[in-house]
Image (spheres, helix red, strand yellow):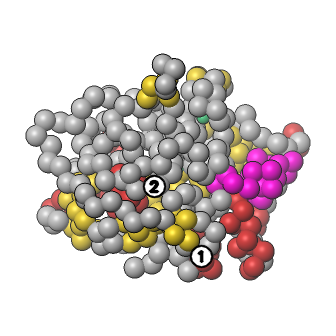
Amino acid sequence: MSSCCSPGGRAGHGDHAPAGAQLFSPSVPAKPSRASGHGHLEVAIPGGTFAMGDPFDEGYPADGEGPVHEVRISGFSIDTTAVSNAAFAAFVDATGYRTESELYGTSAVFHLAVQADAADILGTAAGTPWWLNVRGADWAHPAGPQSSWQDIPDHPVTQVSHTDALAYCAWAGRALPTEAQWEYAARGGMAQARYPWGNELHGTADDGAQLHRCNIWQGTFPTQNTLDDGFLTTAPVDSFEPNGYGLFQTSGNVWEWCADWFLPKYYKGCLAQGTVEDPAGPTIGRGRVMRGGSYLCHDSYCNRYRLAARSSNSPESASGNLGFRTVAPA
Ligand SMILES: [Ca+2]
Ligand SMILES: [Ca+2]
């Protein structure tokens, strides 16, 4: 039930796209943001064709980030941010909806973030001891019973399952993005870049200091976080610079549920078809796709804060580093 990434071999980092890589990029800028009707700004993304997948071959082989294949996407609108705690609270207020973590009575909290009595810490997740199963952790108490969403209303909602995210979307007249929509929007018009802003993880601030562009982990995972980017766990949904389309945090902060089932070999089938139009993913899979990485991602442990990176979790899973953003249904 824990999310974040599975332990695995570190992938190599090339500095540049492979020579001769074919580039596809929509050149039409996105239209200005407008209200989406559920408390968040959205942006209209022009339709176009792009190269989906990892051109650097630096992902975990089991994730199936390649082969790069050409995808045609129809225009759609997408939230500029992940859904916030305040927006999710409005949904709960309006509907009385109970999330799966509330029904189960427990959810997964990162060990350094827990706000709960020892008696409410029920154990760890197999293979990922930094995830604690905490009684009373849910979207309204994201770090355990002694925490409250009201202290962080502008942070992304977490502790929500795929099922919960779909329930929110149904209420808001929205949908989860397909994996292809997500990657196309997350790239912000930059063809085959590693990150939403380019290929280098850090920038340089005016004073010469290292500039952090996203909320991931610095230090020694999972015990010491130097907080160089300012955040141990979640950051407000509109922190750091947005991408070329105005989307915030398509790298880092929280993982984002997508609509698709996850099947690592899916891209191979896409490549065989030539240009794929608005792919909706496989009809069955191991779990639901999640994208973008989180505040727990670190180069030494899980470099899945890259644009092409993919992961998944079972639909009923929830954790403190997994949220979602929505799109306008086609
Ligand atoms: Ca951080
Ligand atoms: Ca994110």
Per the image, the residue denoted by label 1 is 37
Along the viewing direction, whichever of 174 and 134 lies nearer the viewer: 174
Mark 2 touching mark 1, by CB under 8 A? Answer: no
Tell me the SS state at disc 2.
loop
Is 21 part of what is drawn in magenta? no
**Image: magenta residue range:** 139-156
Along the horizontal axis of the image, is 90 left or right of 23? right
Q: Is residue 40 above or below residue 116?
A: below
Say the numbered circle drawn on residue 52. Answer: none
At label 2, the amino acid type is: Gly
Along the viewing direction, whichever of 198 and 296 lies nearer the viewer: 198
At label 1, the amino acid type is: Gly
Real-space CA distance between mark 2 and mark 1, rounded to the nearest whole angstrom: 18 Å
Tell me the SS state at disc 1.
loop
Q: On the rendered image, what quadrant is the C terminus found in?
A: bottom left
Question: Mark 2 or 1 closer to N-term?
Answer: 1
Secondary structure, magenta segment, majority class? loop
Q: Determine the image quadrant of residue 139.
A: bottom right
The percent coordinates of residue 87 (x first, y second) are 68, 66
Per the image, the residue denoted by label 2 is 246
Query: Is the residue marked by circle 2 packed among few (<14), some (14-19), or many (20+) residues within 10 Å?
Result: many
Which residue is pictured at 77% across the width and 41% down the height?
Answer: 114
**Image quarter for ligand 1:** top right
The percent coordinates of residue 320 (x first, y second) are 66, 49
